[in-house]
Image (spheres, helix red, strand yellow):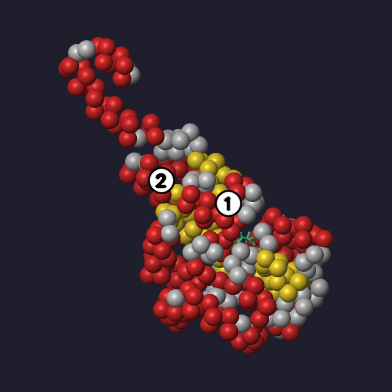
Amino acid sequence: MDRRSLLKAGSAASFAAAAPFIVTRKASAAEYKAEYRLSTVVGTAFPWGKGADLWIKLVKERTQGRINIKMYPGVSLINGDQTREFSAIRQGVIDMAVGSTINWSPQVKELNLFSLPFLSQDHAGLDAITQGEIGKQIFQIVDKAGVVPLAWGENGFREVSNSKREIRTPADMKGLKFRVVGSPIFNDTFSALGANPTQMSWADAQPALSTGAVEGQENPLHVFTAAKLHTLAQKFVTRWGYVADPLIFVVNREIWNSWTPADRELVRQAAIEAGKEEIAIARKGLSGGDMSLVKEVESLGVKVTELSDAEKDAFRQAVKPVFDKWAKQIGPDMVKRAQAAVAARKKA
Ligand code: X2X
C-alpha cells in the first residue's frame, strides 16, 4: 500500500499500523542506489582488481543484492587521471574505490610515508606499519580528509625496470628516462639517483614505454607480468624493494551514511576479508620460499637482478636527502614511529 492509498483508506488504526513500515522503508532500501561505482587503476588480471572484484561479490552476496557495485578500472570515471581519484571520491564522482596510497598522496600528504625510499624492504616491515598503531592513525587521517577507510590491501614492492641495461648501482641509473607515478616524491627520488624522471599516468606510461619516450618504470612484478611489460621493451628488472604501495578500500562518506548500520558492517567485513585475500595474492610467488613469480619474469627473457644488502645500501645513501626532506613534510614523529615499528618487527 502506498502513502496515497493509505490516506484514502481513512482508517486511523490501519494508518498507525502501517506507519512504522513506511519509516523503515524510507531509512533503508528507498535511499539505496541501483548501482555503486567503484574505481581502481587496474582490472581483474592484477591482484588489485581481483581484490576489488572479491569485495564486490562478497557485498552483493551478503546484502542479498541491496548493494550492487560495478568496477571501473583504468580510473575511467575520471578519464584515467589517477592523482585526482581521492578528490573525486570525496566529491561523490566516485562512490567507492580500492586505491593506491601513492595516487592519493597529493591530497593526503601523510600517505607519502609509504613512498619514503627504503623505509621498509620486506612484507613483515610493511605489516608492522599498516597493521599497527600507525595504520590506525593513517585511517583517522583519511577519514578526516573526508573518505571512509575500511581495510588495507597491497599493490606490492615496486621494482625498477628498463630497456637499456642492468641496474646494480646508482651510477647505472644515470641519464635513464623513467616514467614515475603520482606524488612528487618519486621525481625527487629518481633525480637524486641521477636518472631523468617524468611523471605520467599508468595509461600514458604504456605507450611511452612502447615508443621509447621513456626507457624505464617501477611497478610490482605482478603488474609487470599482467601488463606484459616485457613486450614494452623492459628487459632488465632490479629487485631493490625501495617502496611498496599499500591499497586502501574506501567508501564516499555520504554513500556510507546512506546505508543502514547493519549493511555498513557487512561492507566493512567484506572489505577486510577481500583485503586479506588480496594481500595474499599480491605476495604470491614472492614470499614463503615460493619465488615462482621471479622465475616467471625470467622466463619472459628478462634479466632479474638481486641486490646484496651492501648494494641496496648504496641506493639508500644516495636517496637519504630525499627521505629526510619528505619526512619533514609527512611528520617527523610519524616517520620515526614507522622506523621503530619496522626495526622492532625485524628483531622479532
Ligand atoms: O600507476 C602505477 O604505476 C600503478 C598502477 O602502480 C599505480 O596506480 C600506483
Q: Mark 1 to mark 2: distance in Å?
A: 20 Å
Q: Can you tell me which quadrant of the image ligand 1 is in?
A: bottom right
- Note whether 301 is above or below 56 in the view shown: below
Q: Residue at x 50, y 40 (%)?
A: 36
Does residue 22 appear to the left or right of 164 in the view shown?
A: left
Place of residue 329 in the rendered image (x, y in percent of width and height, measured from the top left): 49, 75
Q: Is residue 113 above or below residue 64?
A: below
Look at the numbered disc 2 and give the secondary structure of its residue: helix
Tell us which disc is closer to us: 1 or 2. Answer: 2
| Dot 2 crowding, Cα within 10 Å, few <14, some 14–19, many 20+ | some
Q: Residue at x 67, y 76 (%)?
A: 190
Q: Amino acid at mark 1?
A: Thr
- Residue 312 in the image, given as x and y percentages of width and height: 63, 83
Q: Secondary structure at mark 1?
A: loop
- Measured from the top left, where is residue 292 in percent x and y? 66, 65
Q: Amino acid at mark 2?
A: Glu
Q: Earlier in the sequence, mark 1 or mark 2?
A: 1
Q: Residues within 10 Å of mark 1 (few under 14, many from 20)?
A: many
Examine the rendered structure and indicate whether residue 299 appears above or below residue 312.
above
> Seen from this angle, which residue lies furthest top?
9
Q: Is residue 329 visible?
A: yes
Q: Is 247 displayed left or right of 159 in the figure?
A: left
Image quarter hosting the N terminus: top left
- Residue marked by disc 2: 254
Q: Nearer the viewer, residue 163 or 76?
A: 76
For disc 1, the marked residue is: 40
